[in-house]
Amino acid sequence: MVKPLPIRAHHMRYFYHPTLHPDVVRKYGPDKIRGMVAYLRDLPPDTEVLITEEPDELCNICDIHDEHCDFPYEDRKAAEELGIEIGKTYILSKLLNRIKTRI
């Protein structure tokens, strides 16, 4: 059995609006953001995704590790905005459809 892929709630925003927050692009740079978006978009639609507030694979793409990495408030805020639950597993395609209605 394959374990669900953990993805931080706030990273789910990048599927539709990688430049949603200009400060994110300024801080991490456009190349890192493009890398995160590419990683997410390359996942198979039937991937099981576990929404988390812990560091995930996308955090590894970024070589800037700061207080943002260990501050789950941003994930809780994003989960509420996107209508998803931290700790819950979703099928990626269904999750994206759900999020699309919220953005």
Image (cartoon, grey):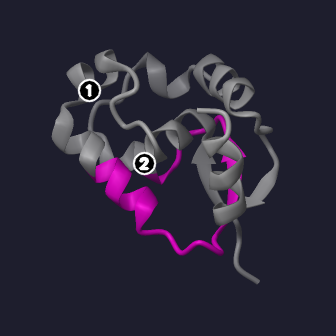
Quarter of the image holding residue 26?
Answer: top left
Q: What's the magenta region?
A: 35-57
**Image position of 35 (left or right of 65):** left
Q: Quadrant of the N terminus?
A: bottom right
Q: Find numbered disc 2 in the image and state the secondary structure of the residue it sits on.
A: helix
Task: Say what amino acid the circle numbered 1 marks.
Answer: Val
Q: Find numbered disc 1 in the image and state the secondary structure of the residue it sits on.
A: helix
**Is 7 placed above or below 45 here?**
above
Q: Residue at x 35, y 49 (%)?
A: 36
Q: Which mark is residue 58?
A: 2
Q: Where is residue 48 in the image (x, y as percent from the top left)?
A: 70, 67
**Image position of 29 (left or right of 12):** left
Which residue occupies the foreground of this view, 56 or 99?
99
Among numbered discs 1 and 2, the one appearing first in the sequence = 1
Question: Is residue 44 found inside the magenta-colored segment of the image?
Answer: yes
Quarter of the image holding residue 74?
Answer: top right
Q: Where is residue 83 in the image (x, y as percent from the top left)?
A: 76, 34
Residue placed under numbered mark 1 in the picture: 25
Q: How far apart are marks 1 and 2 (CA)?
A: 15 Å
Q: Residue furthest bottom?
A: 1
- Choose mark 1 or mark 2, whichever is in front: 1
Which residue occupies the foreground of this view, 91 or 101?
101
Q: In which quarter of the image is the C terminus?
A: top right
**Is 100 placed above or below 93 here?**
above
Q: Residue furthest front?
A: 101
Question: Is residue 23 found inside the magenta-colored segment of the image?
Answer: no
Task: Say what amino acid the circle numbered 2 marks.
Answer: Leu
Q: Residue at x 55, y 42 (%)?
A: 12
Mark 2 neighbour class, 10 Å CA radius: few under 14, some 14 to 19, many 20 or more:
some
Q: Residue at x 76, y 58 (%)?
A: 90
